[in-house]
Image (spheres, rainbow, N blue to C red):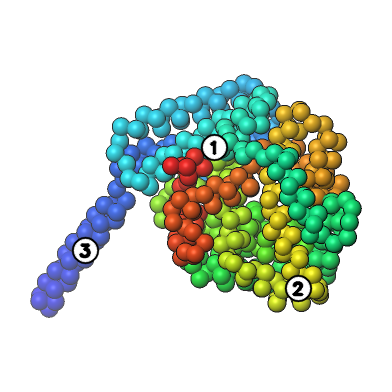
């Protein structure tokens, strides 16, 4: 009996020792450096600042899944110069605090985090200045909000593309009208949109999973909406879940199914947000990634990688082959003129800079609304209704238009400079994965 008591006593002591050792081990695992403690403090203040700005700008906070108690209850407040000046002061204080951390030795990832926070905070400050009534020239606004100078195109270069399209399109006469007529042959019937889009999503996800480890349980649902200034939108909700809304105000072309599935879903915005939540929020407790301010450098990386992701998924002529063999039949469309359709689409990509050119001239006051719509009809080959829809996007989101084409070009250039050439697909995916799962800034891509 006494021996049994001694055994139990020894067992209790061993359990206590193991518990203390375990506690010590966990404590060591969570021990933070002075630099990380200070960065975490700035990050928390940054999140709260973004949420405060969102009280005055309903479009500003694109996503938030951090602590519920941080989210302000007030919404859609009227502009308040006194409050705006306070918010600017907070942003300045946080920027100064970040600058004071330069004395610390930092890892490569910590430097990326520092640069990300600094650029994001500068953009927050700029957005508040704009909300306070300041109007910035288009190029300055783009640089301050998105950390990039917009690329400049000329009407001469655009006209050369129009002339080439003139030779390719059937019939003779006005190029815009002929383009609109030709593309009608490739519009997905409304009754087939769900079927075609589901097939596109499945293919994009399957191809993405060949190169990326997606978080377990990730998913999204698709909703079809009307009367929006955009064509599609990803609303990230946290816990690896998104709501993707697709606007059906205008017919969707067969080529657009993959475009939407890739851009908004796999490997675009949905994957981008999922990987940040998994790698930076859940694994590292970097709270700054629980909030996404729309008007910020983060958007250029998000949009640039989403646009580039379409090409990454379908190298060479794989996209054309999949669409002709799978999506065309699902939509009930003929493939008779499909080869010409793809030649025209490839050439039309060279007109992508039109949107930024038009937005700059319109927002700077150089063109009237009527002049801008007419210009878009001529050089972007849009119907008047689609040109007006694009202009409504510009009026709503202003210089955000630079994030798409300029973002894609910057991603492509970064790929090329880091050996991510078209004949090295594995390397391209490695670089792409890094870009959508680590802190990045547009100007950082130029280094």
- CA distance for labels 2 and 3: 64 Å
Is residue 89 placed above or below 320 in the rendered structure?
Answer: above
- Disc on the earlier residue, 1 or 2: 1
In the visual, does 127 lie left or right of 334? left
Measured as percent of width and height from the top left, residue 177 is found at: 87, 53
Residue at 38% x, 47% y is 109
What residue is shown with label 2?
Answer: 328
Measured as percent of width and height from the top left, residue 163 is found at: 78, 50
Q: Residues within 10 Å of mark 3 (few under 14, many from 20)?
A: few
Measured as percent of width and height from the top left, residue 258 is found at: 67, 64
- Disc on the earlier residue, 2 or 3: 3
Residue placed most toward the observer, 410 or 114: 410
What residue is shown with label 1?
Answer: 147
In the visual, does 215 lie left or right of 184? left
Q: Quadrant of the C terminus?
A: top left
In the visual, does 313 lie left or right of 231? left
Residue at 35% x, 40% y is 37
Is residue 217 placed above or below 353 in the rendered structure?
Answer: below
What residue is shown with label 3?
Answer: 18
Residue placed most toward the observer, 445 or 424: 424
Outermost residue, left side: 3
């Amino acid at each position: 009996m006494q021996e049994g008591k001694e055994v139990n006593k020894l067992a209790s002591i061993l359990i206590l020792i193991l518990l203390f050792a375990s506690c010590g081990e966990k404590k060591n695992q969570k021990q933070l450096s002075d630099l990380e403690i200070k960065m975490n403090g700035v990050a928390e203040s940054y999140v709260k600042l973004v949420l405060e700005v969102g009280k005055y700008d309903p479009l500003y906070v694109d996503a938030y899944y951090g602590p519920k108690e941080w989210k302000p209850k007030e919404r859609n407040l009227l502009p308040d110069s006194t409050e705006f000046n306070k918010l600017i002061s907070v942003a300045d204080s946080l920027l100064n605090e970040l600058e004071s951390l330069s004395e610390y030795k930092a890892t490569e990832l910590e430097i990326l985090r520092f640069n990300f926070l600094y650029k994001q905070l500068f953009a927050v400050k700029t957005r508040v200045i704009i909300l306070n009534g300041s109007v910035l020239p288009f190029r300055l606004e783009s640089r301050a909000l998105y950390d990039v100078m917009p690329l400049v195109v000329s009407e001469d270069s655009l006209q050369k593309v129009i002339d080439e399209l003139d030779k390719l399109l059937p019939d003779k006469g006005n190029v815009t009208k002929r383009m609109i007529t030709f593309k009608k042959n490739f519009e997905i019937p409304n009754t087939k949109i769900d079927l075609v889009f589901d097939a596109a999503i499945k293919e994009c996800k399957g191809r993405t999973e060949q190169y990326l480890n997606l978080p377990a349980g990730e998913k999204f649902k698709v909703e079809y909406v009307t009367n929006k200034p955009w064509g599609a939108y990803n609303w990230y909700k946290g816990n690896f879940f998104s709501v993707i809304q697709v606007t059906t105000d205008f017919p969707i072309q067969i080529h657009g199914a993959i475009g939407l599935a890739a851009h908004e879903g796999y490997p675009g915005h949905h994957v981008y947000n999922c990987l940040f939540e998994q790698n930076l929020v859940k694994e590292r407790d970097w709270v700054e990634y629980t909030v996404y301010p729309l008007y910020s450098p983060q958007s250029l990386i998000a949009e640039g990688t989403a646009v580039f992701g379409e090409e990454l998924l379908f190298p060479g002529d794989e996209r054309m082959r999949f669409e002709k063999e799978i999506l065309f039949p699902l939509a009930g469309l003929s493939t008779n003129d499909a080869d010409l359709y793809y030649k025209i689409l490839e050439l039309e990509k060279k007109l992508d800079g039109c949107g930024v050119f038009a937005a700059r001239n319109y927002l700077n006051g150089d063109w009237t609304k009527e002049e801008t719509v007419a210009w878009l009809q001529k050089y972007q080959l849009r119907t008047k209704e689609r040109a007006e829809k694009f202009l409504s996007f510009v009026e709503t989101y202003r210089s955000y238009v630079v994030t798409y084409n300029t973002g894609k070009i910057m991603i492509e250039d970064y790929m090329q400079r880091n050996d991510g050439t078209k004949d090295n697909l594995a390397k391209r995916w490695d670089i792409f994965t890094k870009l959508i799962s680590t802190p990045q800034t547009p100007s950082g891509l130029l280094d």
